Image (cartoon, grey):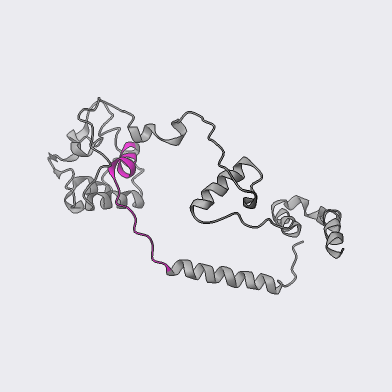
């Protein structure tokens, strides 16, 4: 059975603290997001949804190639594919926004459409100069090649720690190093009562044995505290 006893004053203090923290976080204005760039934000969307007809297929449908930004700077029968700075004038945005493209049941998500709109509105920027030539069909870009899962497995050097950092394992050392860059540190060690409470929530089938386990595990701690 769940413990239905009223919460302690400490529990209410914790709740007030969390509510205050949430209020402070919501009070800060959101950070200004960087403008989308083709290689990082747009090409993955187009590759997943559009390249089979407009880039990697045997024939370019409508004569439209979406593999590079500069390929889109052309007019087709229905108008310009891409007009940097003007989403409403760009056929690319208009076709995905009204659901005409891609021509399948699964359409682009609202977030994907908005990302394309923001990219065009901000000037349709690229992260670097595009290649002068591109082989027919699919290809792997440098950004795709740099994806973490394609990298060879390496054993990174373990960051150095100090005794005050309380790092016990190599994983702790990496955590301490990452936290230090944000001017943070590891949280204090949890006491046995807190650890037992966490186990209670995680090990549901184990609850029936908790009273016996609690006495055997916590009695030495309480004895030391009294002494």
Residue 77 can be seen in this image: yes
Tell me what residue is drawn at x 51 percent, y 67 percent.
22
Image position, residue 76 (x, y; %): 13, 39
Front residue of 25 and 57: 25
- Indicate whether residue 43 is drawn in magenta: yes
The answer to which of 47 and 123 lies nearer the viewer is: 123
Residue 215 belongs to the span the image colors magenta: no
Q: Is residue 24 left or right of residue 78?
A: right
Q: What residue range appears in magenta?
A: 28-47
Front residue of this view, candidates 153 and 169: 169
Number of dots carrying numbers: 0
Which residue sits at x=31%, y=28%?
139
Choose top left, top right, bottom left or bottom right for residue 141.
top left
41 sits left or right of 191 in the view: left
Which quadrant is the N terminus positioned in?
Answer: bottom right
Residue 98 visible in the picture? no
**Would residue 67 appear left or right of 13 to someone viewing this image?**
left
At x 14%, y 44%, the residue is 80
Image spot of residue 185 (x, y percent): 57, 55
Residue 40, quarter of the rendered image = top left
């Amino acid at each position: 059975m769940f413990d239905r006893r009223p919460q302690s004053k400490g529990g209410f203090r914790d709740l007030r603290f969390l509510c205050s923290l949430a209020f402070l976080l919501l009070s800060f204005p959101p950070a200004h997001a960087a403008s989308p760039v083709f290689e990082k934000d747009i090409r993955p969307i187009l590759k997943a949804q559009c390249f089979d007809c407009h880039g990697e297929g045997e024939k370019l449908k409508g004569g439209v190639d979406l593999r590079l930004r500069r390929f889109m700077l052309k007019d087709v029968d229905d108008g310009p594919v891409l007009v940097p700075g003007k989403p409403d004038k760009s056929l690319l945005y208009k076709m995905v926004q009204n659901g005409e493209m891609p021509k399948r049941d699964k359409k682009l998500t609202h977030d994907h459409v908005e990302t394309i709109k923001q990219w065009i509105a901000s000037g349709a920027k690229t992260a670097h100069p595009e290649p002068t030539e591109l082989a027919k069909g699919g290809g792997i870009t440098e950004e795709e090649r740099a994806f973490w899962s394609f990298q060879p497995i390496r054993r990174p050097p373990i960051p150095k720690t100090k005794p005050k950092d309380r790092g016990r394992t190599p994983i702790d050392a990496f955590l301490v190093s990452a936290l230090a860059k944000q001017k943070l540190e590891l949280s204090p060690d949890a006491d046995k009562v807190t650890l037992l409470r966490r186990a209670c929530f995680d090990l549901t089938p184990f609850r029936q044995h908790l009273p016996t386990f609690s006495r055997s595990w916590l009695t030495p701690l309480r004895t030391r505290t009294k002494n």
